[in-house]
């Protein structure tokens, strides 16, 4: 019995120590962006300023969380273009590059469907997308990404993007270009392969006090397929 109690005590101590390590290395992020327009992959959602909160928990390369977009301009007739996304991601270093894997569940609370409707073939409330991206080191700050709708979107539309980042006078500049395979249901506004998202984003930290700064960002975005451009500004808190 004494040996059994000793073994139980050792196991309990190891479990507690392991839990303490995980707890100490777990990070919780909470924040929000306020943007003049919600432009997603070259498309304007809501034609209104948008508040975009996020909550995520990360540990050892894994991350799980939720992100939302809430249209601030409300129309008495048109339903607001609100959105809640749930995501699970994993990042791992491969040599000098980083591989990022991501699964995202897109949910639109004003679509008229209930949250618990998980029907497929365009009938449910949730569209699930899987993504993979590869990011280069600081010496070659390029990234490429590919995303595919794998559930509840009949055409399984895909989106591909390439980008490059650099810095100029304490400002980070990110150039990007994205294209889609398109589909018959016009998920990205086209039924054929087209470039839909080209532009640049600038990010700069604004110092308020010695202990508080916040980033301000602006983007120029062109959708060549729709022949329309956007100029967006936002802040992060």
Image: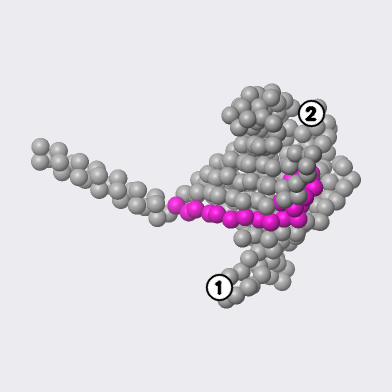
Q: Nearer the viewer, residue 119 or 58?
A: 119
The x and y percentages for residue 129 are: 65, 35
- In what element is the residue under mark 2? loop
In reply to whether residue 47 is colored magenta, the answer given is: yes
Q: Nearer the viewer, residue 233 or 5?
A: 233
Residue 32 horizontal side relative to residue 230, left or right:
left
Residue 185, labelled with which disc?
A: 2
Mark 1 neighbour class, 10 Å CA radius: few under 14, some 14 to 19, many 20 or more: few
Q: Residue at x 69, y 66 (%)?
A: 204
Magenta range = 26-50
Q: Residue furthest right?
A: 227
The x and y percentages for residue 85 are: 62, 41
Q: How is the image coloured?
A: one colour
N-term-proximal mark, 2 vs 1:
2
- Check the picture and name the quadrant holding the C terminus: bottom right
Mark 2 neighbour class, 10 Å CA radius: few under 14, some 14 to 19, many 20 or more: some
Residue 79, labelled with which disc?
A: none
**According to the image, label 1 marks what residue?**
211
In reply to whether residue 180 is colored magenta, the answer given is: no
The x and y percentages for residue 53 are: 62, 51
Is 195 located above or below residue 121 in the figure?
below
Q: Residue furthest left?
A: 2
Nearest-to-viewer mark from 2 and 1? 1
Q: Residue at x 63, y 66 (%)?
A: 214
- In what element is the residue under mark 1? loop
**Callout 2 touching callout 1 (CB < 8 Å):** no
Displayed quadrant of residue 1: top left
Q: Residue furthest front?
A: 76
């Amino acid at each position: 019995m004494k040996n059994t109690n000793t073994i139980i005590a050792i196991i309990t101590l190891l479990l507690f120590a392991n839990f303490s390590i995980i707890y100490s290395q777990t990070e919780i992020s909470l924040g929000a962006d306020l943007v003049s327009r919600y432009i997603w992959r070259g498309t304007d959602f809501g034609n209104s300023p948008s508040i975009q909160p996020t909550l995520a928990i990360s540990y050892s390369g894994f991350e799980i969380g939720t992100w939302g977009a809430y249209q601030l301009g409300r129309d008495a007739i048109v339903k607001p273009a609100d959105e809640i996304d749930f995501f699970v991601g994993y990042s791992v270093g491969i040599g000098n590059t980083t591989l990022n894997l991501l699964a995202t569940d897109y949910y639109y609370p004003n679509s008229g469907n209930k949250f618990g409707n998980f029907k497929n073939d365009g009938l449910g409330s949730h569209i699930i997308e899987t993504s993979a991206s590869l990011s280069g080191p600081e010496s070659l700050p390029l990234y490429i990404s590919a995303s595919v709708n794998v559930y509840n979107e009949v055409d399984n539309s895909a989106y591909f993007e390439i980008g490059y980042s650099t810095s100029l006078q304490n400002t980070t500049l990110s150039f990007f270009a994205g294209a889609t395979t398109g589909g018959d249901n016009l998920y990205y506004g086209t039924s054929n392969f087209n470039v839909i998202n080209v532009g640049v984003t600038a990010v700069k930290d604004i110092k308020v006090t010695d202990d508080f700064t916040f980033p301000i960002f602006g983007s120029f975005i062109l959708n060549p397929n729709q022949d329309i451009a956007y100029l967006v500004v936002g802040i992060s808190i």
